[in-house]
Amino acid sequence: MPSSTVPRLLAALACLPLLGGAAHADTCDDLARQIAGAIGGKVGKRAGPSIDLRLAGPIKFDVTCRAEPIVQATSAEPAPSATFFRDLSVASEILIGESASTVEPIIANAYRTSLSERRKSFIQQNGWSASCYTDPGSTTMRTLCSVGRIPPG
């Protein structure tokens, strides 16, 4: 092997882990675009593994891609609107593959449980979960709900 081949080979091998991260980022960006399009939003800024989705009104969304992607919605409304639950369930359908009509009542149940028990509510389903946290006294974030696949292991 020529002496210049070894350094090039080592440099190429050193870059391989970066390619996986770039592919993961592209997958997450594509997922964020699909979700934004489905709920009438636009893809906003990316910060690390999280991508903000911009929507008009008091509801905020983001997609976070780590081991498994998660979609999260927050609302500053005293009680989240029907749009909050509908948009989160539509986003969840894209993310986890369960129908929005299956996911929506589970998210609503997690919300009601969180509100009545004054703690984070976490509901596991077949390989995915929905969770909600409520803070009725807050003026900036009164409800935060998320849906995502449960990482294997």
Image (cartoon, grey):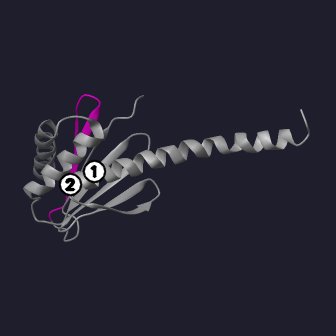
Could you tell whether 80 is left or right of 50 in the image?
left
Most extreme residue toward the bottom is: 139
Disc 2 packing (10 Å; few <14; some 14–19; many ≥20): some
Q: Position of residue 104 (x, y in %)?
A: 13, 43
In what element is the residue under mark 2? loop
Q: Which residue is located at x 10 percent, y 41 percent?
A: 105
Tell me, yes or no, if residue 130 can be seen here: no
Q: Is residue 44 magenta?
A: no
Q: Position of residue 12 (x, y in %)?
A: 72, 42
Give the residues drawn in magenta, as a range.
Answer: 120-136
Tell me, yes or no, if residue 18 can be seen here: yes
Overall secondary structure of the magenta section:
strand
Most extreme residue toward the right is: 3
Which disc number belongs to residue 125? Answer: none
Q: Which residue is located at x 60 percent, y 46 percent?
A: 18
Dot 1 corresponds to which residue? 35
Q: Quadrant of residue 141?
A: bottom left
Pointers 2 and 1 in contact (C-beta within 8 Å): yes
Which quadrant is home to the N terminus?
top right
Closer to us: 139 or 64: 64
Disc 1 packing (10 Å; few <14; some 14–19; many ≥20): many
CA gap between label 2 and label 1 equals: 6 Å
| Kind of residue at badge 2 | Ile
Q: Position of residue 66 (x, y in %)?
A: 43, 45
Dot 2 corresponds to which residue? 39
| Kind of residue at badge 1 | Ile
In what element is the residue under mark 1? helix
Q: Which residue is located at x 9 percent, y 60 percent?
A: 79
Could you tell whether 48 is left or right of 64 in the image?
right
Q: Which residue is located at x 13 percent, y 36 percent?
A: 102
Which quadrant is home to the C terminus?
top left
